[in-house]
Image (cartoon, rainbow, N blue to C red):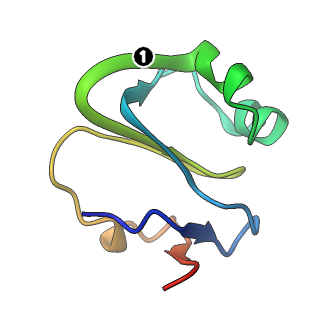
């Protein structure tokens, strides 16, 4: 389970999530900085993968394909934004 209202405290952007996708390995900071939150532009580096989920804000991104505790990732500054 994941909060669907995550917000990044580093860039102050809402964290977008995409079910059944992962990020291409060529993704970098500038890609997200220049393309968030335009889904049409982000799709250029999204790869379909059933059961996975791609997360991104303007400064960080993750592809998750197994149960993962995102709170243990020190570099992520994502917090619940609404609940």
10 Å crowding of disc 1: few (<14), some (14-19), many (20+): some
Residue depicted at 74% across the width and 41% down the height: 37
In the rendered structure, the answer to whether residue 76 lies left or right of residue 28 reads left
Quadrant hosting residue 62: top left
Residue depicted at 67% across the width and 30% down the height: 39
- Residue placed furthest toward the left: 67
| Mark 1 secondary-structure assignment | strand
Residue 64 on image: x %, y %: 30, 43
Quadrant hosting residue 41: top right
Residue 47 on image: x %, y %: 42, 16
Q: With respect to residue 59, does 45 lie above or below? A: above
In the rendered structure, the answer to whether residue 69 lies left or right of residue 21 reads left
The residue wearing badge 1 is 47
Residue depicted at 47% across the width and 22% down the height: 25
- Nearer-the-camera pick, 37 or 26: 37
Residue 16 on image: x %, y %: 57, 49
Q: With respect to residue 7, does 38 lie above or below? A: above
Q: Report the number of discs.
A: 1
Location of the N terminus (image quadrant): bottom left
- Residue placed furthest toward the right: 34
Residue depicted at 79% across the width and 42% down the height: 33
Residue 38 on image: x %, y %: 76, 33
Q: With respect to residue 67, does 69 lie above or below? A: below
């Amino acid at each position: 389970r994941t909060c669907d209202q995550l917000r990044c405290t580093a860039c102050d952007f809402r964290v977008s999530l995409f079910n059944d996708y992962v990020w291409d390995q060529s993704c970098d900071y500038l890609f997200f900085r220049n393309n968030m939150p335009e889904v049409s532009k982000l799709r250029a580096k999204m790869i379909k993968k059933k059961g996975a989920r791609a997360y991104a804000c303007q400064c960080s991104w993750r592809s998750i394909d197994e149960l993962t505790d995102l709170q243990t990732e020190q570099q992520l500054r994502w917090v619940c934004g609404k609940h």
